[in-house]
Image (tube, rainbow, N blue to C red):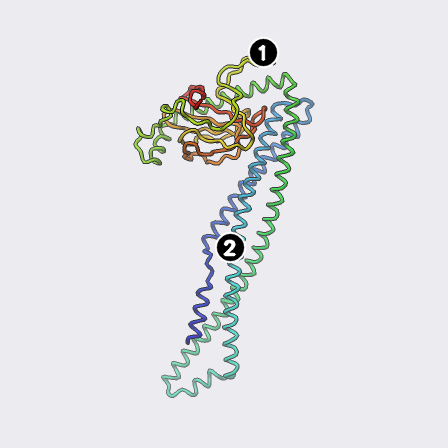
Amino acid sequence: MIKNFTVFLILTLFQPSISLGQTEDLDKNIKTQSKKLTEIRKEISRLNSRINKSQKDEKTTLKQIHDLDKQIVMITQLKKELLKERKLKEAQIDLLKATIQTTDEKIRVMKERAASRAVRAYKMGQNRDVDLLLTSGDIHQALRRSTYLSAINAAERETLNELQVMISSNKSSQNNLARRLGEVKRNIKEEEQTGKQISSRQKTKESQLKTLKKDRRGLQQQVKTKEAAAAKIKGMIQDLEQKKQERLRELARRRGMTMDQAKGEFAKYKGKLAWPVKGELVGSFGPHKNEKLGTVINNPGIDISAPRGKAVHVVLDGIVVAITWIPGYGNTMIVDHGDSYYTVYAHIDNIQVNMNGYVLRDQIVANVSDTGSLNGARLHFEVWKGKDKVDPLKWLKR
């Protein structure tokens, strides 16, 4: 009796500790990640076709460079998403290994139990059940023994069936494990390939930029692209202003405030805001004359030169209301600080926040990059009051 209880206790203790929910969640996340990767690969392929087609032209155009620039961003994103997928698959591999190990132990215990019962049955002889019934003292004892023997036989059959199911399940888990290990190897290989592609595309872009800067027509295209980018930002700010009441309610809800309390304090920080990135000011706000073209270009913000990968900080609390790609600006993010104040961050990469996410003052939100930039790594930073752009230098600490 004690031995049977011990076996039962062992089997109970060796029940898999991994819940079905954990496995299902990982499967779901891996499927979602795979879909995302498929879309990114399609976009990279589409851009590649456009680049290959445009390269047949003799002259390097700004459009070629923008397509190449965007492809670099997409490949960088692909590498990042591949890493996420690999980590999900590695987590699933750990679960599978734990499941296999637990099931192996349970199979071992059950096999020992079955073998022990088989030895006892052999020692008692083939007619043990009949002998037990014939040696019963009376009919009631015979009935009790019959019921007991039936229960034992049924338990043995159930144990054997369960053992077969577990062996089959373990085989399936081992096959699944082998498949996932193969997928992880392919992930690592693709990650390595994307790293080489980024380096190759970056060199091509730098070469094309040198050619473009010697071409007057290319410089004119650059000016038009910048003007179009600034106009797009203005349009986005105007659209955001129309929906600001809805965001204000959401901000109030998140911070546990009234609508009036959540309106924002941006105006109080004039001249007191920390710089979004530490670097050299290479482009100030307002009109600038382009000596080569003899035209006046209006800068809607400031440009801060900084090493690629330098952390970009949000200047004040707010809600991320736009994350997009704009030719001439590259990866761009807009933050609503309430009371109709907005800040714009362009030429960035490795964006670490999500749309509609709440950000805190000085929080790292991205890294400096050269996305959309024809002049190297830098941060383009703008401040808007409603539909009007204002000089960011008046808001930053001097």
Circle 2 packing at 10 Å, graded few (<14), some (14-19), many (20+), is some
Q: SS class of the residue under badge 2?
A: helix
Front residue of this view, candidates 272 and 206: 272
Q: Quadrant of residue 395?
A: top left
Position of 98 with respect to 212 (left or right) is: left
Q: Is residue 126 visible?
A: no
* Residue ID for mark 2: 95
Q: Is residue 312 above or below residue 296?
A: below
Q: Residue 213 at what x, y percent from top left?
A: 63, 20
Q: Amino acid at mark 1?
A: Gly
* Residue ID for mark 1: 294
Residue found at the far top of this picture: 294
Circle 1 packing at 10 Å, graded few (<14), some (14-19), many (20+), is few
Q: SS class of the residue under badge 1?
A: loop
Q: Residue 54 at what x, y percent from top left?
A: 65, 26
Residue located 58% across and 30% down the image: 70
Q: Is residue 68 above or below residue 187?
A: above
Q: Earlier in the sequence, mark 2 or mark 1?
A: 2
Q: Amino acid at mark 2?
A: Leu
> Can you say which quadrant of the picture contains the N terminus?
bottom left
Front residue of this view, candidates 99 and 278: 278
Q: Is residue 151 above or below residue 232?
A: below
